[in-house]
Image: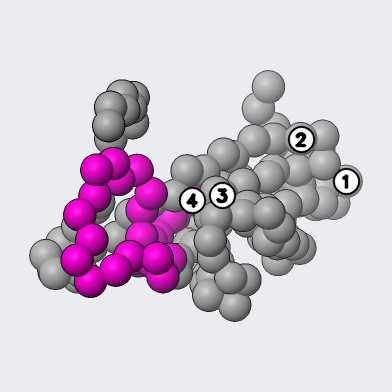
């Protein structure tokens, strides 16, 4: 079997948690639309109820554990590109977005979080970058 891959399998170790507590970070896109900001996270194989989403100020933390229900006891990988186990992603949003009005949906293996722009305060325009 031959396979060439341009990606590398990374697992992060959080020093605050200790070396035995590792996690991986899912692929994430963050982009701006006319109505706000979208965070899209690739989480195939997950169930909605196994995802945790925590908002602290302008930071969003998504975490959970992707189970590996297919691996047998004497499994030897020839190619391993899919991450299993605990994952975590923390995203800090720029100013000008209203996390209290954000909505989230999980469909077809993608978690999507839509964050609207903050309403103008006292008629002042909401700053945005071009």
Element on which disc 4 rests: strand
Can you tell which of label 3 and label 2 is closer to the viewer? 3
- Counting residues from the start of the chain, the first of labels 2 and 1 encountered is 2
Residue 41 coordinates in the image, percent (x, y): 56, 49
82, above or below 5, in the image: below
Q: Quadrant of residue 29?
A: top right
Q: Label 4, on which residue?
A: 91
Question: Mark 1 and mark 3 in contact (Cβ < 8 Å)?
Answer: no
Q: Which residues are magenta?
A: 65-92
Q: Secondary structure at mark 1?
A: loop
- Alpha-carbon distance for marks 4 and 2? 17 Å
Give coordinates of residue 107: x percent, y percent: 71, 57
Mark 4 or mark 1, whichever is nearer to me: 4
| Left or right of residue 64, residue 107 in this image | right
Q: Residue at 69%, 43% (x, y): give it.
A: 37
Q: Are marks 4 and 1 in contact (CB under 8 Å)?
A: no
Q: Main secondary structure of the magenta part?
A: loop
Residue 97 position within the rendered picture, expressed as x and y whole percent measured from the top left? 69, 49
Looking at the image, which is closer to me, 117 or 22? 22
- Contact between marks 4 and 3 (CB within 8 A): the answer is no
Which mark sits nearer the N-terminus, 4 or 3?
3
For marks 4 and 3, give the CA distance: 11 Å
**Circle 2 SS class:** loop
Badge number at residue 123 = 1
Residue at coordinates 68% horizontally, 45% vertically from top-left?
A: 38
Crowding around mark 3 (Cα neighbors within 10 Å: few <14, some 14 to 19, many 20+) is many
Tell me the CA gap for discs 4 and 1: 29 Å
Circle 3 SS class: strand
Residue 83 has which mark? Answer: none
What residue does disc 2 label?
Answer: 33
Q: Quadrant of residue 95?
A: top right
Give the labeled residue for mark 3.
41
């Amino acid at each position: 079997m031959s396979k060439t891959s341009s990606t590398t399998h990374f697992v992060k170790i959080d020093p605050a948690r200790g070396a035995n507590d590792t996690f991986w970070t899912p692929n994430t896109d963050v982009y701006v639309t006319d109505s706000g900001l979208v965070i899209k996270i690739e989480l195939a194989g997950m169930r909605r109820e196994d995802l945790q989403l925590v908002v602290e100020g302008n930071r969003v933390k998504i975490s959970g554990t992707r189970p590996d229900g297919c691996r047998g006891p004497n499994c030897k990988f020839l190619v391993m590109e899919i991450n299993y186990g605990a994952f975590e992603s923390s995203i800090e949003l720029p100013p000008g977005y209203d996390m209290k009005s954000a909505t989230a949906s999980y469909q077809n293996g993608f978690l999507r979080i839509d964050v609207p722009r903050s309403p103008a305060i006292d008629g002042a325009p909401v700053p945005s970058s071009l």
